[in-house]
Amino acid sequence: MIERFNKAIFIIPAIALILFGLGIWHTLNPSLEVQWSTASEIETLGFNVFRADTIAGPFVYQVNKTLVAPKGDSLTGGQYKLTDHDIQVGRTYFFLLQELQMGGQTEDFGPIEIAVNSIGWIEITAAVLIYLVYLIIRKKSAEKLIRN
């Protein structure tokens, strides 16, 4: 029992510290991931993802720096994800997916709405709670050892 407790003395605070650091990093470097999938891709040259501050646009900010290459085919389609690092917590963004076809035509999908809420705070809160529980357990274990 004491050996397990000695390991927990180092492991639990380390886990709390890692979670806290991760939360701080996410808070200072917010990002969100835009995901989409296709059922089939016939003559698809690639995809662009545009962002706007309102549902009406204008959708002028292009999230991807280069055309997202197609991964699927005419039977299976593909799954995609793209990370937008240029966001602010507390704001709502609207994204528009544009498929570019080999003939030069485009087809737009969306827009979709994504609210960027408390990025990082979940990890920070979890870290604090884990550490508080650790302190309580440590205190009770120390009291038990003193009584014995």
Image (cartoon, rainbow, N blue to C red):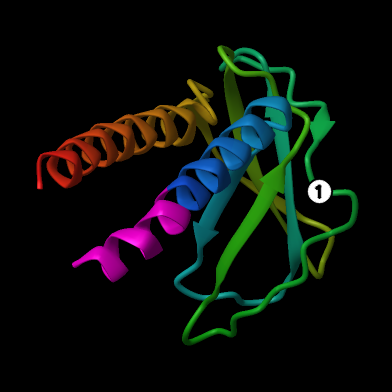
Pick the residue in front: 31 or 132.
Answer: 132
In the picture provided, is 118 more to the left or to the right than 140? Answer: right
Query: Can you say whether 103 is above or below 98 in the image?
Result: below
Decide whether the magenta segment is chiefly helix, strand or loop. helix
> How busy is the neighbourhood of tag 1: few (under 14 within 10 Å), some, or many (20 plus)?
some
> Which quadrant of the figure contains the N terminus?
bottom left
Q: Residue 43: where, in percent of width, then height?
A: 70, 76
Pick the residue in front: 27 or 11.
Answer: 11
In the picture provided, is 48 more to the left or to the right than 146? Answer: right
Residue depicted at 70% across the width and 29% down the height: 51
Residue depicted at 82% across the width and 66% down the height: 103
Residue placed under numbered mark 1 in the picture: 64
Q: Residue 10: where, in percent of width, then height?
A: 47, 56
Total marks in image: 1
Image quadrant where residue 85 sits: top right
Residue 11 in magenta stretch: yes
Residue 20 in magenta stretch: no
> Regarding mark 1 in the picture, which secondary structure is present there?
loop
Magenta residues span 1-12
Query: Can you say whether 73 is above or below 22 in the image?
Result: below
Residue depicted at 52% across the width and 51% down the height: 14
Q: Indicate the amino acid at tag 1.
A: Asn
Query: Can you say whether 118 is above or below 90 in the image?
Result: below
Q: Residue 41: where, in percent of width, then height?
A: 59, 75
Residue depicted at 78% across the width and 40% down the height: 63
In the picture provided, is 2 more to the left or to the right than 67? Answer: left
